[in-house]
Image (cartoon, helix red, strand yellow):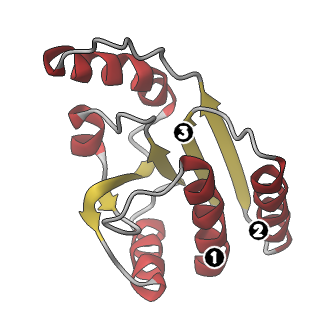
Amino acid sequence: MTCVIMCVGKIKDAFYRDEIKKYSELIRKKGHTLEIYELADEKIPDNLKDKNKEGLIEKECKRMFDKITSKDYVIALCIEGKEITTKKHREYIDCAKEDGYQKIVYVIGGSLGLPETMKKRANLKLSFSKMTFPHQMMRMVLCEEIYNIL
């Protein structure tokens, strides 16, 4: 199984980079692949108006849509998503495999989140918590979760 994490922004902290690399190697040892695409984030103007926010997010995430196909099971990480157990997460992935999906693609937006179009495209909207966490930390936690479900 191939899992993909598509995210806006880069991991800057060496600790998180090392942990993500460790989990990638552990996933590979289980016979699976983890691909990570870090997409450039857009500069957010200081005076950004709410009416312009969605356009900026769309622009930021357009490259995600360019890489996603109809054969991908897309999981959007967003605060309004479902909070589920690791066991239930595994069940979703098993069903996706049974339904013939070739890749599991996790999408993580930048500091402004994901556009509505991506949330509508997602097969599952997932939330790890109603709290806000640093993106770097959540990427590492997601890698551990992927390792646990495969």
The x, y position of residue 126, in whole percent, is: 35, 62
Q: Residue at position x 43%, y 77% from top?
A: 89
Element assignment for label 2:
helix
To which residue does mark 2 refer?
Answer: 27
Q: Earlier in the sequence, mark 2 or mark 1?
A: 2
Q: Is residue 137 left or right of residue 29?
A: left
Q: Is residue 25 left or right of residue 103?
A: right
Element assignment for label 3:
strand
Element assignment for label 1:
loop
Q: Amino acid at mark 3?
A: Cys
Q: Residue at position x 36%, y 64% from top?
A: 131
Classify mark 3: residues with Cα within 10 Å, few (<14), some (14-19) or many (20+): many
Q: Earlier in the sequence, mark 2 or mark 3?
A: 3
Q: Residue at position x 21%, y 43% from top?
A: 120
Q: Nearer the viewer, mark 2 or mark 3?
A: 3
Q: Is residue 82 left or right of residue 74?
A: left
User: Disc 1 and disc 3: Cα gap in Å?
Assistant: 21 Å
To which residue does mark 1 refer?
Answer: 150
Task: In this rendered view, identify the residue nearer to me: 143 or 71.
Answer: 143
Asked which quadrant contains residue 127, the reply is bottom left
Task: In this rendered view, identify the residue nearer to me: 23 or 135.
Answer: 135
Q: Amino acid at mark 2?
A: Ile
Q: Nearer the viewer, mark 1 or mark 3?
A: 3
Classify 146 as above or below 104: below
User: Which image quarter holds the N terminus?
Assistant: bottom right
Q: Earlier in the sequence, mark 1 or mark 3?
A: 3
The x, y position of residue 28, in whole percent, is: 81, 64
Marks 1 and 3 close (CB-CB < 8 Å): no
Marks 2 and 1 close (CB-CB < 8 Å): yes
To which residue does mark 3 refer?
Answer: 7
Q: Amino acid at mark 1?
A: Leu
